[in-house]
């Protein structure tokens, strides 16, 4: 239309037509070279300054499309007369036309610096590629921004992993192929038309391919993060979904773009082979592995609900370099988020247990776990309460592990782990090589020199082996077991079960003292019943008297108790003397030493309008008993008076008074 207005499409005069025909017959290359030079001169004079002003404008949105439109107009201005009046005169049309196009592409490249065109092209590619690849639909706000008409229509086309997992297996392969959204179709056609114009004006070729590769590289990472971040459920089908997306969406889009944007030396459509698609899949798995490594600490904390993420990571750690990358970044996360004074020992041990289970699934050989566990174990050795927390967890009630309101100060899952003891995991534990094992394999090449292969994720053994000697655990076991055994309870089945299971690991001799402690309780219960019967028969005890029960402990096998000395009421002293007398008749060579502060007292207080009945400590009962025979009403005593009367320390008296 512009050339018609300028009267440039009118046929030449007879003389001009004969001259052109003569030149095309005698020296066509000279004519086309002259015309090429005039194209360059005319472009530099009439177009270059305007394009430079456009590039310098602050508004960058849509700028490259405007420039490409201007360049396409200039190309038509230069080539249309040639197509109409010169090329029909020669049989070598393709070569002459290519000469003119090269001249035009050269002057365009000279006039428009690529360092200014490159970011504009990347922005245009990203704007439409995000829609074509489906990344925009993975945004949390996409559904809220969608129109009501789109939401009412049932969509069959989707790249969402959530939609893919909810679909039946027969329809999954077609979700990214059939029924493409009109938004995607419009964005694809718009971008391909733009790239076609870009190629025609000389801004495509190798440089545009590099920009396209950079954009696609970034968008693959964006898609993987948007689609799979936080998707940790098991069993995981993320690799399968990613493979289908790369094959049906990513590779298809790349083929369409590369068929347009090709270098000058290429002929025909750029071929994307199956090997290229496989390489893209490998890149996608690597990006997925990088995402999972960044989430790995949270994955371990949420274990076992997040085991699907570890399944994804197994596809990534098949080579030495990715394995080193996993251990390096996870160790940094441990130092920053766990191994510091702000984390309690229980929290650290809980994460360590999850690390053992997660990394055993990730790498059954245990090489990665061996690397990761070293800083955790080293840090736990320096904590004063590590042994106490472990032993407390072993002695905890396994039923509390499944309770919704489990305490945070006890490692209850250790008790559950101990009850699930697998006998197979205890076999050949100390053997480096089992010559009868037909599935034996040598140590992995990336194993440490002191690496020891673990055949199972034995949490208990990993925690017990924190310290060089098992005596530390045995001693702490005696202390905590003693505290539990002196409590008033109907039975000690849990402690007996734990002791039997630990004997499998530590041996009978190591836990001999604990066995004696349990035996003392059984013997003392029977002996207590015998002594009371003797007292009733001798008339020293009636049914109306206060009842005194004793646990008789073997002094050499029980740990030292922190005993608070004080004077118990006189009637209690009398009961103790009668009890000791009957005991010594039964056991001639043994005498009783009373630990008054370790007992419990069932007490009843009567007030004017109510009564109080509960179980308290002996020193609390002793303090309240001191008010019973007071001559004044109401009874009043000062703390120093109580301390002197009861021969009790001032802090203990004050604590009892605060309790009452």
Image (cartoon, helix red, strand yellow):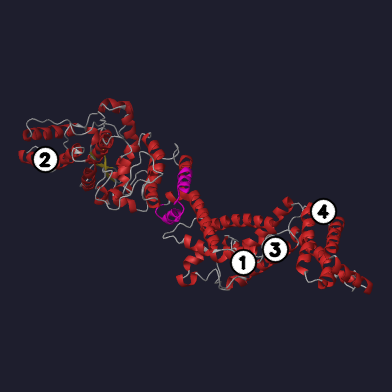
In which quadrant of the rendered view does residue 341 lie?
top left
Q: Secondary structure at mark 2?
A: helix
N-terminal-most mark, 2 or 1 = 1
Contact (Cβ within 8 Å) of mark 4 with mark 2:
no
> 184 or 421: which is nearer to us?
184
Q: Do the CB atoms of the residues marked 2 and 1 lie less than 8 Å apart?
A: no
The kind of secondary structure element at disc 3 is: helix
State which region is magenta: 303-329
x and y percentages locating residue 46 in the rendered image: 87, 58
Q: Nearer the viewer, mark 3 or mark 1?
A: 3
Residue identifier under label 4: 53
Circle 2 residue: 527
Residue linked to disc 3: 195
Q: CA distance from mark 4 to mark 3?
A: 23 Å
Q: Nearer the viewer, mark 1 or mark 4?
A: 4
Whichever of labels 3 and 2 marks the residue nearer the N terminus, that label is 3
| Residue 508 against residue 115 in the figure, above or below | above
Mark linked to residue 146: 1
Kindly indicate whether the residue at mark 4 contacts the one at mark 1 (C-beta within 8 angstroms): no
Q: Is residue 7 magenta?
A: no
Nearer mark to the viewer, of 4 and 2: 4
Q: Is residue 195 above or below residue 385?
A: below
Residues 100 and 538: in front is 100
């Amino acid at each position: 239309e512009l050339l018609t207005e300028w009267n440039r499409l009118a046929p030449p005069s007879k003389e001009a037509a004969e001259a052109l025909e003569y030149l095309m017959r005698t020296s066509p290359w000279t004519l086309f070279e002259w015309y090429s030079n005039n194209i360059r001169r005319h472009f530099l004079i009439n177009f270059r300054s305007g394009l430079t002003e456009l590039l310098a404008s602050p508004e960058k949105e849509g700028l490259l499309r405007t420039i490409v439109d201007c360049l396409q107009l200039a190309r038509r201005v230069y080539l249309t007369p040639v197509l109409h009046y010169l090329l029909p005169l020669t049989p070598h049309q393709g070569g002459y036309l290519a000469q003119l196009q090269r001249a035009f592409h050269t002057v365009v490249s000279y006039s428009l610096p690529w360092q200014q065109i490159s970011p504009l092209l990347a922005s245009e590619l990203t704007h439409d590629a995000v829609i074509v690849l489906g990344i925009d639909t993975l945004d949390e706000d996409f559904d809220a921004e969608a129109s009501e008409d789109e939401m009412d229509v049932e969509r069959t086309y989707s790249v969402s992993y959530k939609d893919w997992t909810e679909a039946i297996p027969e329809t999954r392969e077609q979700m990214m192929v059939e029924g493409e959204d009109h938004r995607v179709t419009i964005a694809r056609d718009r971008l391909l038309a733009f790239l076609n114009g870009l190629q025609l004006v000389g801004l495509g070729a190798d440089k545009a391919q590099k920009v396209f590769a950079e954009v696609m590289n970034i968008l693959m990472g964006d898609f993987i993060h948007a689609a799979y971040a936080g998707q940790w459920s098991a069993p995981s089908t993320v690799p399968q979904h990613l493979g289908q997306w790369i094959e049906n969406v990513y590779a298809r889009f790349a083929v369409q773009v590369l068929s347009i944007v090709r270098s000058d030396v290429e002929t025909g459509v750029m071929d994307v082979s199956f090997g290229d698609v496989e390489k893209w899949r490998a890149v996608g798995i690597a990006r997925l592995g990088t995402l999972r490594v960044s989430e790995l600490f949270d994955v371990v904390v949420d274990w076992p609900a997040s085991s699907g993420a570890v399944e994804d990571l197994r596809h990534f750690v098949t080579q030495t370099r990715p394995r080193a990358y996993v251990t390096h970044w996870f160790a940094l996360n441990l130092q920053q988020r766990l191994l510091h004074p702000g984390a309690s020992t229980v929290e650290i041990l809980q994460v360590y247990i999850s690390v053992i289970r997660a990394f055993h699934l990730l790498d059954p050989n245990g090489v990665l776990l061996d690397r990761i566990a070293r800083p955790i174990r080293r840090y736990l050795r320096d904590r004063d309460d590590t042994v106490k927390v472990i032993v407390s967890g072993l002695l905890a009630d396994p039923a509390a592990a499944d309770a919704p309101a489990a305490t945070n100060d006890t490692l209850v899952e250790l008790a559950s782990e101990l009850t699930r003891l697998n006998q197979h995991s205890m076999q050949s534990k100390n053997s480096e090589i089992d010559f009868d094992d037909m599935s034996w394999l040598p140590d992995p090449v990336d194993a440490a020199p002191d690496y020891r292969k673990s055949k199972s994720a034995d949490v208990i053994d990993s925690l017990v082996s924190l310290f060089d000697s098992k005596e530390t655990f045995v001693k702490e076991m005696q202390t905590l077991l003693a505290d539990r055994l002196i409590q008033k309870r109907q039975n000690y089945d849990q402690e007996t079960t734990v002791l039997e299971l630990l004997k499998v690991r530590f041996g009978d001799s190591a836990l001999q003292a604990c066995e004696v402690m349990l035996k003392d309780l059984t013997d003392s219960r029977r002996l207590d019943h015998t002594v009371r019967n003797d007292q009733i028969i001798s008339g020293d005890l009636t049914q109306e008297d206060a009842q005194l029960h004793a646990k008789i402990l073997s002094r050499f096998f029980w740990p030292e108790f922190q005993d608070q000395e004080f004077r118990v009421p006189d009637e209690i002293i009398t009961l103790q003397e009668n009890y000791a007398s009957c005991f010594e008749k039964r056991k001639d060579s043994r005498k009783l030493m009373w630990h008054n502060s370790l007992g419990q007292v069932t007490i009843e207080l009567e007030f004017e309008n109510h009564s109080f009945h509960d179980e308290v400590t002996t020193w609390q009962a002793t303090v309240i008993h001191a008010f019973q025979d007071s001559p004044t009403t109401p009874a009043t005593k000062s703390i120093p008076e109580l301390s002197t009367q009861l021969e009790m320390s001032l802090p203990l008296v004050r604590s009892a008074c605060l309790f009452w």
